[in-house]
Image: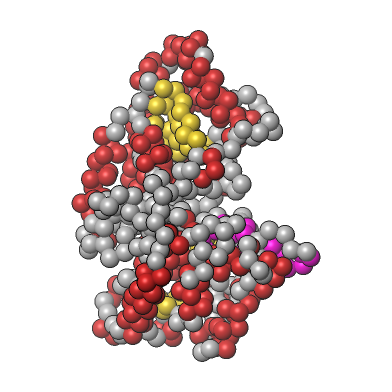
Amino acid sequence: MACKPIPVFFLFFYFFSFFIQLYFAQHISPPEILPKHCDDRWIHIRSLPSRFNLDLLSNCSEYPIFDDFCPYLANHGLGHKTYNRSHSWYRTDPSMLELIFHRRMLEYPCLTSDPDSADAIYLPYYTSIDALRYLYGSQVNSSAEHGLELFEFLSRNQPEIWNRRLGHDHFFVMARPAWDFSQPLENDPPIWGTSLLELPQFFNVTALTYEGRAWPWQEQAIPYPTSFHPPNLAFLESWLQRVKRSKRSTLMLFAGGGGISATPNIRRSIRIECQSANDDDDVTNSRKGRNGDASLYSKLCEVVDCSNGICEHDPVRYFRPMLQATFCLQPPGDTPTRRSTFDGILAGCIPVFFEDLSAKSQYKWHLPEETFEEFAVTIPKEDVVFKGIKILDVLMGIPRARIRRMREKVIELIPSVMYRKHGSSLGLRTKKDAVDIAIEGTLQKIGMRVKELDLE
């Protein structure tokens, strides 16, 4: 079903309601009357001119090479509901993370209007949306200037807020991998990306992004939003029960595109192996003969072709197959990480990775590194592409009891990787979701850095 366009009056209403909520978030509940559990958790939302956030949304149809993202603005970035009667499922686009996070920050219980008493400063800057004019618009040859206008504002408007820690206590969200903001300043002519994260002015700011680079300490990856945003605990519990009851009739599944070129790569190897497993009865029977557990599956491998973005806003297309699969293959594409990782977890499908940069070394707050092997499988892509290791053989060699334990761990992760709906019930707020964990991790990260600075 195609997304409906957003009328002008909706944009006006959206901006107005957001400004009202932001005003109350900034001007009520002084610190002295708020609960003691806010010790070391105070956050101040920096008041930025609307040109750094909401005004950018009015340009939602100006970048046809990228996309017309007007339809995705509905429901504060969650997008349209998949169906009119849906309560939890939306056609969410990953580029809307900055809106989703901003809206949720307005509900954070430990906000303070006093920046001097804050443990962290949140910058509601729509980084990736502002980057569109440098990536696809008229300023494509000025990408090294991305962020300079923001820094000029921070250094001139109430400069004492910035100067107190020189940005060490500030953080913002980026709805793109960090690589897209890491173009070297000296590149002439510019190549892909902007240079925001290469600007010395922002070296101290914590950046929450979909994919961090290996070396900068200030970058931290947080989950891609899926299409599931429950408004209360009952809808979450109902989904968890469905995931637990789902019959896993497919051994492994790959939902994605690519892998059709002649050049050896992991996606090509997956497609070839999957096609071979389903076409060759002798291969299938021999595997069943070696491992009786294979007889539990009516299909050894399934590919959900998501080429050309056909799955992006149609979660039914891939969630139903994921609910029927035991393992979900998560090969790297243009970059190591992918949204499908979190779609699969949400469906209770055990993730299979082919390099650590896809998840293990990225999402340490949400997918704990110390217990990673308890809920995920890792098969080096070089072993599959160049050494002839068969993914099916590895997965079929995992004992049934271990598979059951791994699925239980995956299901336990579901609340922590989902983005619950803004304005959700108090009962659901007792479950920490992706935003809660990101805020908690950010406060700890900034707190440790500030303590180090105080000791210097």
Compare residues 329 and 378 and report the one nearer the observer.
Answer: 329
Which residue is pictured at 68% across the width and 58% down the height?
Answer: 192
Q: Which residues are magenta?
A: 173-188
Figure colour scheme: secondary structure
Compare residues 385 and 90 and report the one nearer the observer.
Answer: 90
Which residue is pictured at 42% across the width and 78% down the height?
Answer: 45
Q: Is residue 107 magenta?
A: no
Q: Quadrant of residue 433?
A: bottom left
Query: Where's the C terminus, which quadrant?
Result: bottom right
Residue 217 placement (x, y as % from top left): 58, 63
Residue 33 placement (x, y as % from top left): 25, 83
Q: Is residue 185 magenta?
A: yes
Name the dominant secondary structure of the magenta segment. loop
- Residue 198, placed above or below residue 284: below
- Residue 117, placed above or below residue 174: below
Residue 441 placement (x, y as % from top left): 44, 63
197 relative to 339 in the view: left or right: right
| Res 212 visible | no
Which residue is pictured at 37% across the width and 62% down the height?
Answer: 74
| Res 133 visible | yes
Compare residues 160 and 25 and report the one nearer the observer.
Answer: 25
397 relative to 28 in the view: left or right: right
Q: Quadrant of residue 332?
A: top right
Residue 344 placement (x, y as % from top left): 41, 41
- Residue 37, placed above or below residue 364: below
55 relative to 140 in the view: left or right: left
Which residue is pictured at 46% across the width and 47% down the height?
Answer: 312
